[in-house]
Amino acid sequence: MEVAAGLLTAALRAFADAGAPKPPLYNLTLPVGWRDTPASMAAVEWRRRAAVAAGLTHEVERLRLQWTTDVGLPASRAG
């Protein structure tokens, strides 16, 4: 975790030194049900701790919805 925090800190400093008006976003794309899997929870937790140690304290969680062809199309509502 300390190495990851150091890398994030150095990267954020490099962006600031290059004149970036604000730091870039740090995103984690997680699988459905990640909270139900101890390994996934552990993987997220050390990344979260590293981000906080690097000064990234604003956290937002978003759902990402994706349609796939195997689900088919919804029925038409036109009447």
Image (cartoon, rainbow, N blue to C red):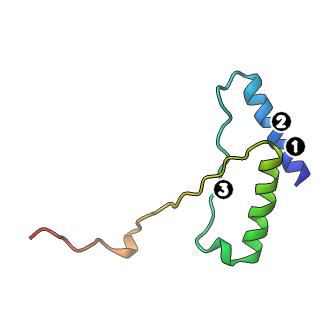
Q: Judge left or right: residue 59 versus residue 39.
A: left
**Relative image position of residue 27 (x, y in whole percent):** 65, 51
Specify the amino acid type for callout 3: Leu
Q: Earlier in the sequence, mark 1 or mark 3?
A: 1
* Label annotation for residue 10: 2
**Relative image position of residue 76 (x, y in whole percent):** 19, 71
Q: Judge left or right: residue 73 versus residue 55.
A: left
Pointer 3 residue: 28
Per the image, label 2 sits on a secondary structure element best described as helix
Q: Is residue 70 above or below residue 52?
A: below
Per the image, label 1 sits on a secondary structure element best described as helix
Q: CA distance from mark 2 to mark 1?
A: 6 Å
**Relative image position of residue 44 (x, y in whole percent):** 74, 63
Graded by Cα atoms within 10 Å as few (under 14), some (14 to 19) or many (20 or more), the crowding at tag 3 reads few
Marks 2,1: beta carbons within 8 A: yes
Specify the amino acid type for callout 2: Ala
Q: Is residue 33 above or below residue 46?
A: below
* Label annotation for residue 6: 1
